[in-house]
Image: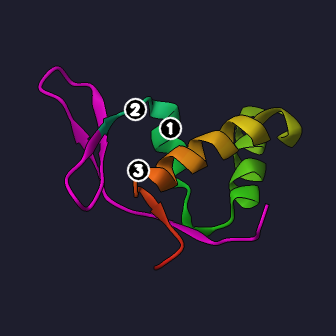
Amino acid sequence: MAVEKLFKRGQIGETPQGEKLLVNDKGNAYLVSDSVIAIWSSFKGNTTEEVVQEVATVIGRDPSEVREPIEQIVSQLKEAELLSSAE
């Protein structure tokens, strides 16, 4: 995977029922879990690998156990325009 520094885009929102949303700069909202918000919040010019290492340390797991799921989440967040390589 290329070494790409990523920055979070958009903001956190909430449904009237209290469910968490991530809302991109275009106003598109996505229902997400607290785990996805935690991963999204980690991107402040970090690479995906740096976030993998950080998450693995926090939850006490080997990075190889969390790499693939985090890479999938990152891919979806980029597609939803919630992560960008532009600051």
- Vertical comparison of 44 with 71: above or below: below
Residue at disc 1, secondary structure? helix
- Would residue 40 be found to the left or right of residue 27 on screen? right
**Residue at the location (67% across, 71% down)?**
4
The residue furthest front is 79
Q: CA distance from mark 3 to mark 1?
A: 13 Å
Label 1: how many Cα within 10 Å (few below 14, some 14–19, many 20+)? some
Instruction: Check if residue 15 falls in the magenta segment.
Output: yes
Q: Which residue is mark 2?
A: 32
Q: Between residue 15 and residue 3, name the one nearer to us.
A: 3
In the rendered view, tell whether residue 52 sits above or below residue 68. Answer: below
- Tag of residue 36: 1
Which element is circle 2 on?
loop
Q: Amino acid at mark 1?
A: Val
Viewer-proximal residue among 28 and 9: 28
Q: Determine whether 76 is above or below 24 in the image.
A: above
Q: Quadrant of residue 18?
A: top left
Closer to the N terminus: mark 3 or mark 1?
1
Which segment is the magenta one?
1-29
Classify residue 87 as left or right of residue 56.
left
